[in-house]
Image (cartoon, rainbow, N blue to C red):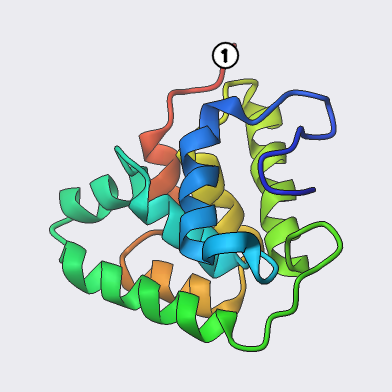
Amino acid sequence: MAVGESDDEGEATEPLEAFWAAVRRVQGEGGRRGVTDADMLGGLFEVGDSALARMVAADGGDLEAARVAIADAVAAEAEGVPGSAQGMTEVARGVAEVMFEERRVRGQAQRQEDVLLGLLLAGGARVKSVLAGLGIDRARVLRELPPPPA
């Protein structure tokens, strides 16, 4: 799935348009390589009204330290990552698949928290380590979500 495309049920990712735009900014001009899970983490942190930044701040975390840790992960992941046929690395595609499945299971509109859940489940070790260092785990993310419809 390319950045910003429709999911397997044909529903567009408009609720996350700002997130995907932030991912493209983090990835770099011209999309010179495949989008990584670290790009997705960086986009999630940089998007306006960032759910991730909000959670880090609410838990008393240092936003600047978080920004540095995420930027370091983006730089490390970018080294040697070739562009892929669909514009995303295998790991990033896995994150997107989990993210869409999380939304489908809950029956709710896509949210930034779905991206976090995807990163926690399918992200690479570096991204999972950054999230753990920020105190972000599945239980923490789920507390931010409204309950699924009955």
> In x, y percent, where is residue 135?
32, 64
In which quadrant of the rendered image does the C terminus lie? top right
Amino acid, disc 1 = Pro
- As rendered, which of 122 and 5 lies closer to the eye? 5
Q: Is residue 22 above or below residue 69?
A: above
Which residue corresponds to the image point at 57% horizontal and 14% vertical from the top-left? 149
Can residue 138 be seen? Answer: no
101 shown above or below 77 = above
Can residue 118 be seen in this snapshot?
yes
- Pick out the residue farthest to the front: 30
Classify residue 25 as left or right of residue 32.
left
Report the number of numbered marks: 1
Residue furthest to the top? 150
Quadrant of residue 87 in the image?
Answer: bottom right
Q: Nearer the viewer, residue 32 or 12?
A: 32
The residue that appears at 47% across and 57% down in the rendered structure is 25
Q: Is residue 56 left or right of residue 74?
A: left
| Residue at 82 percent of width and 24 percent of height | 10
Q: Residues within 10 Å of mark 1 (few under 14, many from 20)?
A: few
**Residue on which the image places disc 1:** 149
Which quarter of the figure has residue 32? bottom right
Which x, y percent locates residue 60? Answer: 13, 58
Residue 140: percent from the left, percent from the top?
37, 49
Q: Secondary structure at mark 1?
A: loop
Relative side of 28 to 59, left or right: right
Residue 27 image point, x, y percent: 54, 64
Vertical side of 44 occupied by 71: above or below:
below
Locate residue 53 relative to residue 22 in the image: left or right: left
> Which residue occupies the foreground of this view, 113 or 44?
44
Residue in the image at 43% along x and 51% along y? 44
